Amino acid sequence: MASTERTLVLVKPDGVRRGLTGEVLRRVETKGYAVVALEMRVATRDLLEQHYAEHIGKPFYEPLVEFMSSGPVVAAVVEGQRVIEGFRSLAGSTEPTLAPPGTIRGDLGRDWGTSVQQNLVHGSDSVESAAREIGIWFPGL
């Protein structure tokens, strides 16, 4: 049996602004995952520089940091069997227009014509990324 994993889930500023935090968390919990930490905050530039360190210098970096600091973000640590893969499947493609119906982005997202894709949620993409990201957002865990 696969071991229990943890992942970082972020409801991005567009999701918070649109009042979708509860719907995202409902889908996470309905899937059977446990929310083990939860916090709403406006992300600082320092925190975002740590989170997006691998993207520094790329053309989309500054617009991404600007978007992610444009309003409150809800950060959650979610736990369960294969939760990293499971949440990414639940979230759907990073491109909301192509995300299948039934996914968070497929049901709730769309292209807004902005310079950075506003796609509602973030989920860690690997065990290593999850550990690094959880350490940035929830250093006490």
Image: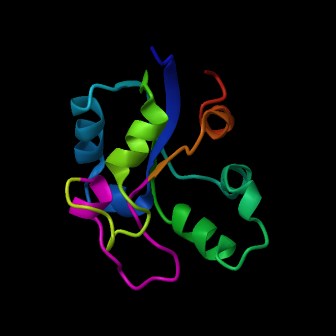
Q: Is residue 112 magenta?
A: yes
User: Percent from the top left, x then y, of residue 38?
Assistant: 43, 32
Where does the C terminus fall, quadrant-wise? top right
- 120 magenta-colored: yes
Q: Is residue 70 above or below residue 2?
A: below
Magenta residue span: 103-121
Q: Is residue 23 above or below residue 3?
A: below
Q: Nearer the viewer, residue 69 or 23?
A: 23
Give the prevailing secondary structure in the magenta stretch. Answer: loop
Q: Is residue 56 left or right of residue 125?
A: right
Q: Determine whether, in the image, residue 16 is placed left or right of residue 124.
A: left
Quadrant that contains the N terminus: top left
39 sits left or right of 100 in the view: right
Q: Nearer the viewer, residue 64 or 69?
A: 64
Task: Give the image quarter of residue 58.
Answer: bottom right
Q: Is residue 110 visible?
A: yes
